[in-house]
């Protein structure tokens, strides 16, 4: 069933990619700001609040669980805000929902010297019988147009029931995804008080449930108009803490489990992935700017896959067009969306995705399915990352060499004008093992390293101590072990990462120089020698990788082998620990 869902989604996404037409901003001013063609002085705040500690702690202090709750209660009143639902009613349907979001952006702009510029992104596409659709967004103009790249915080507002185009059912869509919409609105309210060098876009999309249509439209618009995007932070299913009877892998530990202190960051790729680099940046900024001041620390998990097995979200269209993008999702989900499976009783993608329950059976909701303080903590993580991206320095580049089997030499080669740089070093996981700071130099040698294959990137640090996004990631092998056969002396099969793994892991092959071959694949076998998976892999110079996702395999030790033209080149073991 999982594999079938994956294939259907992949087909749907590929078939519909860029099918939208007549894409336009309804506010010409917003269009100019997105492109960076505006006068920043026209949008300067009377009092410019742009220090990192002011922004970070201000977001922490002002994001309100009560404000988030009010937004979610209001969104639920629209009853069915399916993408194909009523556009004319003032109280029900997607039309009423998007007009209310637009009015909130106007309200927040009025409270902040009219600096937040709201607009719709309109496009034409037949979705559930409706042909004209609108995302709602507001852009806070940056103070410096030298670098025109923007930062997007997004969440979809469209809801659904068991049937994807059912516009008559009660589809409050509270966890999926009033939680994400409320988070975007709350950050628009709070972050509009501050000033950022880069423009920040707060976007509420539609059409996510039918095929990521709203996000596709904005990504396509950005590509067509030359809008530069520094980062996309997508928020979807971000407020619930209860594990349902089902959840899409990698998911929660078991039915009824509660988790209000962890959040999952999904992003595409492994080695040299700008999307994983963005996720690592988000976690680092939380640790260094917020963690000392929060009352309840959050655990941020950088996940191996781009999304849950067989699932997808609004970050994917941006990633497809090479914009750095990632997704925030709750640690626990109530359901895997398999609504056609007999006996499915969870809330996600059903009429049961409502505000909550009445424990006293008096019709008054006293037990909410979204945990508002948890949602507020996730909003703060988002806002802090976007804020630091908005004021941080330029991204550097570097060269990596290995002077010995125990040392690495790093030299900054691009954006060399900063006094400090930070070096991110990782070996077996998706996160950095260590982050080193170098001051007053462009060259550093890290010594006495244990044997491992290391992935290294570097970040610029400005005078306020804020990091840039990490550079291109480079790799070096300090194991001194190659184990290559003559057939492929220029290939090296690397240890999977992470290892041990839960649900998904990346298997990589490093190619030193071009090789001639017809077919290559990774063969995965269980402890009894039974092949459980065969995955094609390209062997191009540099790092090549495939994602191994658990489907029905049991926990234990597995052997994976690089096969080239029918011959085994090298094998390694990995541990699946479910």
Image: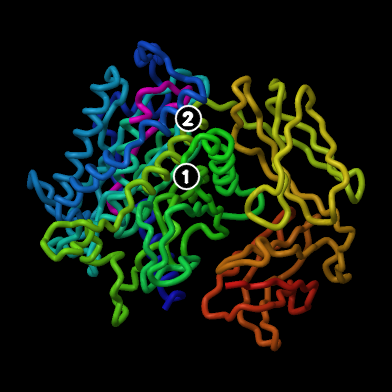
Q: Earlier in the sequence, mark 1 or mark 2?
A: 2
Q: Residue 278: image x %, image y %?
A: 55, 43
Q: Secondary structure at mark 2?
A: helix
Q: Is residue 421 above or below residue 308?
A: above
Along the viewing direction, whichever of 425 and 214 lies nearer the viewer: 425
The picture quadrant where one finds residue 27 is top left
Residue 510 part of the magenta-drawn span: no
User: Does 444 appear above or below 379?
Assistant: above
What residue sits right under mark 2 in the picture?
A: 56
Residue at 15 percent across and 46 percent down: it is 95
Q: Position of residue 195 (x, y in %)?
A: 42, 21
**Magenta residue span:** 190-207
Q: Is 279 situated left or right of 440 in this image?
A: left
- The image quarter containing residue 356 is bottom left
Residue at the spot 40% in from the left edge and 31% down from the top edge = 61
User: Which quarter of the image is occupied by the C terminus?
Assistant: bottom right
Q: Count all numbered tags in the image, as a single digit.
A: 2
Mark 1 vs 2: CB contact within 8 A: no
Distance from Cα at disc 1 to Cα at disc 2 = 16 Å
Q: Is residue 75 above or below residue 148?
A: below
Residue 55 seen in the figure = yes
**Is residue 462 rendered to the left or right of residue 447?**
left
């Amino acid at each position: 069933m999982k594999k079938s869902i994956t294939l259907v989604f992949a087909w749907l996404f590929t078939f519909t990619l860029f099918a939208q037409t007549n894409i336009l901003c309804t506010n010409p001013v917003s269009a100019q700001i997105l492109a960076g063609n505006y006068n920043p002085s026209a949008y300067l705040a009377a009092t410019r609040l742009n220090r990192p500690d002011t922004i970070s702690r201000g977001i922490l202090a002002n994001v309100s669980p009560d404000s988030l709750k009010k937004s979610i209660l209001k969104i639920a009143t629209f009853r069915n805000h399916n993408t194909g639902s009523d556009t004319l009613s003032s109280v029900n349907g997607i039309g009423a929902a998007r007009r209310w979001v637009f009015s909130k952006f106007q309200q927040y702009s009025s409270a902040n010297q009219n600096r937040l510029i709201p607009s719709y992104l309109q496009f034409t596409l037949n979705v559930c019988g409706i042909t004209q659709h609108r995302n709602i967004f507001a852009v806070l103009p940056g103070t410096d147009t030298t670098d025109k790249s923007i930062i997007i915080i997004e969440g979809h507002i469209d809801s659904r029931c068991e049937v994807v185009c059912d516009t008559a059912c009660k589809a409050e869509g509270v966890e999926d995804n009033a939680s994400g919409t409320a988070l975007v609105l709350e950050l628009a309210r709070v972050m509009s008080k501050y000033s950022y060098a880069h423009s920040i876009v707060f976007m509420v999309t539609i059409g996510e449930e039918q095929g990521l249509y709203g996000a596709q439209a904005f990504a396509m618009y950005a590509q067509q108009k030359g809008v530069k995007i520094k980062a996309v932070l997508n928020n979807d299913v971000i407020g619930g803490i209860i594990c349902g009877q089902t959840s899409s892998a990698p998911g929660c530990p078991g039915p009824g489990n509660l988790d209000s202190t962890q959040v999952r960051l999904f992003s595409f790729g492994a080695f040299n992935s700008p999307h994983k680099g963005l996720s690592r940046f988000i976690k680092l900024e939380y640790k260094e700017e917020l963690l000392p001041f929060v009352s309840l620390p959050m655990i941020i998990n950088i996940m191996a896959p781009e999304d849950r097995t067989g699932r997808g979200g609004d970050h994917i269209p941006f990633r497809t067009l090479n914009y750095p993008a990632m997704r925030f999702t709750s640690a626990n989900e109530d359901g895997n969306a398999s609504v056609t499976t007999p006996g499915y009783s969870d809330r996600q993608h059903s009429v049961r995705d409502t505000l909550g329950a009445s424990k006293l059976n008096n019709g008054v909701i006293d037990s909410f399915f979204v945990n508002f303080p948890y949602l507020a903590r996730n909003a703060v993580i988002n806002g802090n990352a976007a804020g630091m991206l908005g004021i941080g320095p330029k991204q550097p580049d570097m060269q990596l060499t290995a002077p010995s089997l125990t040392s690495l030499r790093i030299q900054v080669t691009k954006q060399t004008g900063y006094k400090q740089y930070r070096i991110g070093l990782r070996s077996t996981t998706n996160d950095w093992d260590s982050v080193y700071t170098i001051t007053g130099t462009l060259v550093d040698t890290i010594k006495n390293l244990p044997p491992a294959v290391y992935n290294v990137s570097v970040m610029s640090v400005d005078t306020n101590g804020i990091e840039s996004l990490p550079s291109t990631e480079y790799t070096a092998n300090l194991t001194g072990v190659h184990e290559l056969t003559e057939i492929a002396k220029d290939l090296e099969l690397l240890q999977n990462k992470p290892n041990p793994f839960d649900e998904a892991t990346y298997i990589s092959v490093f190619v030193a120089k071009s090789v001639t071959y017809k077919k290559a694949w990774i063969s995965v076998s269980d402890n009894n020698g039974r092949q459980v998976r065969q995955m094609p892999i390209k062997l191009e110079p540099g790092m090549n990788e495939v994602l191994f996702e658990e489907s029905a395999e049991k926990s234990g030790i597995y052997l994976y082998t690089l096969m080239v033209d029918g011959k085994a080149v090298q094998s390694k073991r990995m541990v699946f620990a479910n």
